[in-house]
Amino acid sequence: MMRAQHMAIQSNYSSVLISEFLLICFPNYQNWQHWLSMPLSLLFLLAMGANTTLLITIWLEASLHEPMYYLLSLLSLLDIVLCLTVIPKVLAIFWFDLRPISFSACFLQMFIMNSFLPMESCTFMVMAYDRYVAICHPLRYPSIITGQFVVRAATFIMARNVLLTMPIPILSSRLRYCVRIIKNCICTNMSVSKLSCDDITLNQLYQFVIGWTLLGSDLILIVLSYSFILKVVLRIKAEGAVAKALSTCGSHFILILFFSTVLLVLVITNLARERISPDVPILLNILHHLIPPALNPIVYGVRTKEIKQGIQKLLRRL
């Protein structure tokens, strides 16, 4: 009886003592950090600069005040928030060895990552629907895809993903922690919750079900949209019409490819973690918050004539 009480007191005492976590990036290859800091810094500056330029261009250029570009603005905003949530802390660890992170900051970072990632996926799904209506029902496009539609879509994207992913950091924050060292550069749910003294089955199960439900349903709807688009495009017999129709979807398809490929590689490496170094999924997780945000605005800027012209006008004003 006395031993059980002593263990309970010790457990409570240890949980009180732990008021912050320590992030240990690349536990097996600490010397990687200095080499990685430069390319990660350049990618971060590129992502922030490109997305900010795109947002300012769409804001200032009246010809870009259309639903398709409003959705692209939403995507850029999500990319900026994700970058600012993850990368500055990673660079602070690399440059200044600032490994400690408070409980509140850790769970806030976890919440943003878990909610904004499916927000991006949901935005891609809405953009796919936009392209489906534009190509399959062009005469009805102005009446369906309106400013009000964008507002409703944005509200749905925010509400769905915030409400369904909020339990993930809440469940993690209610756990008792006996260890404070996180072998990761960021506060992912799995990296943090496995430090707990409590049972984390519910935590893991909820994240697995919600993650695959949200991302999986978005992917299915995206595939269906492009299947209908392809079916309609193949029926078009006018010369050059097929190429023109596909070019309107090209930029969007490339963005989805960037997003899905990095995410798929990350999932595969996590499943095969026993065969590869644990540092590989950590690096891929960081890159997933950098590569798509850096390339998304560049792809649209290069492939979309209206955006390219808007950026050129913006540069002339400077």
Image (cartoon, rainbow, N blue to C red):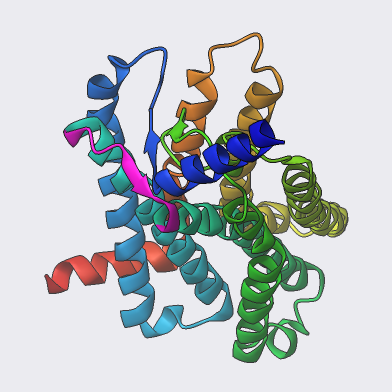
Q: In which quarter of the image is the C terminus?
A: bottom left
Image position of 118 with respect to 7: above or below: below
Q: Give the range drawn in magenta.
A: 96-104
Residue 177 visible somewhere in the drawing: no
Q: In which quarter of the image is the N terminus?
A: top right
Classify residue 79 by image quadrant: bottom left
Q: Where is residue 208 in the image (x, y as percent from the top left)?
A: 77, 44
Q: Is residue 103 magenta?
A: yes
Q: Nearer the viewer, residue 239 or 93?
A: 93
Image position of 91 with respect to 247: above or below: above
Classify residue 33 by image quadrant: top left
Q: Is residue 205 magenta?
A: no
Name which residue lies at 43% across and 53% down. 103
Name which residue lies at 64% across and 64% down. 166
Name which residue lies at 77% across and 53% down. 210
Q: Where is residue 242 in the image (x, y as percent from the top left)?
A: 73, 54
Q: Position of residue 10 (x, y in %)?
A: 53, 37
Name which residue lies at 74% across and 85% down. 144
Q: In this view, does 114 lie to the left or right of 141?
A: left
Q: Nearer the viewer, residue 130 or 10?
A: 10
Give the farthest residue toward the top.
275
Q: Which of 70 and 208 is in front in this view?
A: 208
Q: How many labels does the image show?
A: 0
Q: Is residue 134 left or right of residue 51?
A: right
Residue 106 visible somewhere in the drawing: yes
